[in-house]
Amino acid sequence: MAGTEEMARRAGEFFRVAAGFSIEDAEPQRLRYHLLRLTVVGLTQEDVADLGELSRLAFQDSDVKKQATKIKERVDASPLAFAIADVVEQAGDILGGRVSPKTVLFGAVLGAYTSLGGASDVPESTVATLGAIGGAVAVSTSTFVTDNINRKSWFEYLRMDE
């Protein structure tokens, strides 16, 4: 089993492979292709359909709670589908609603591509789930930081003094 040190030394390789798939799937400009790619790490066709509806609601800035609950209550929902639905549902409660479900959903789906990078000694579904959480955090925080910086300036944000 690959240890943390070996994985760290191959991080660039894992990133390159996963990012390559992600960008390839982005070319047709359909979220559907991202979800279909993730069937290799556990999403089912029903997950794809349900996450597609969750995505539609999130991108329309509609309430996502009912659809997220539907996914999470399905006994046959994959762990990855459950995780994506759960983090998207939580988005509206962060910072008084300033973290959008759309941003979190986008980050979670793309973050799940981490599992496609070839770290075969770790269960793909585990890597996909952790990647979904990390991607949701990274994209939503990046959006939050960028919005705050645009209110001030990049110069102020990058200052190292107190």
Image (cartoon, rainbow, N blue to C red):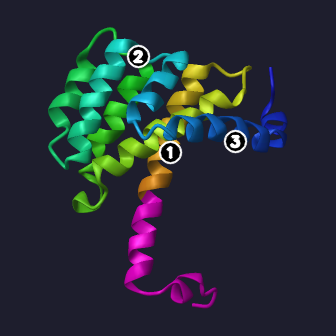
For label 1, the SS is: helix
- For badge 1, the amino acid type reads Gly
Q: Quadrant of the N terminus?
A: top right
Q: Position of residue 126 (x, y in %)?
A: 56, 24
Image position of 20 (left or right of 92): right
Label 2 sits on residue: 78
> Which image quarter: residue 151?
bottom left
Q: Position of residue 124 (x, y in %)?
A: 61, 21
- Of labels 3 and 1, earlier in sequence is 3
- The residue lying toward the viewer, choosing from 33 and 161, is 33
> Which image quarter: residue 2?
top right
For label 2, the SS is: loop
Label 3 sits on residue: 15
Label 1 with label 2: CB-CB less than 8 Å: no
Q: Residues within 10 Å of mark 3 (few under 14, many from 20)?
A: some
Residue 103 vertical position relative to residue 20 in the rendered view, above or below: below
- Of labels 2 and 3, earlier in sequence is 3
- Of labels 1 and 2, earlier in sequence is 2
Q: Residues within 10 Å of mark 1 (few under 14, many from 20)?
A: many
Is residue 103 covered in magenta? no
Marks 2, 3: nearer the viewer: 3
Q: Position of residue 143 (x, y in %)?
A: 42, 63
For label 3, the SS is: helix
Label 1 sits on residue: 135
Residue 147 disc label = none
Residue 156 vertical position relative to residue 58 in the rendered view, above or below: below
Q: Quadrant of the C terminus?
A: bottom right
Segment colored magenta: 141-162
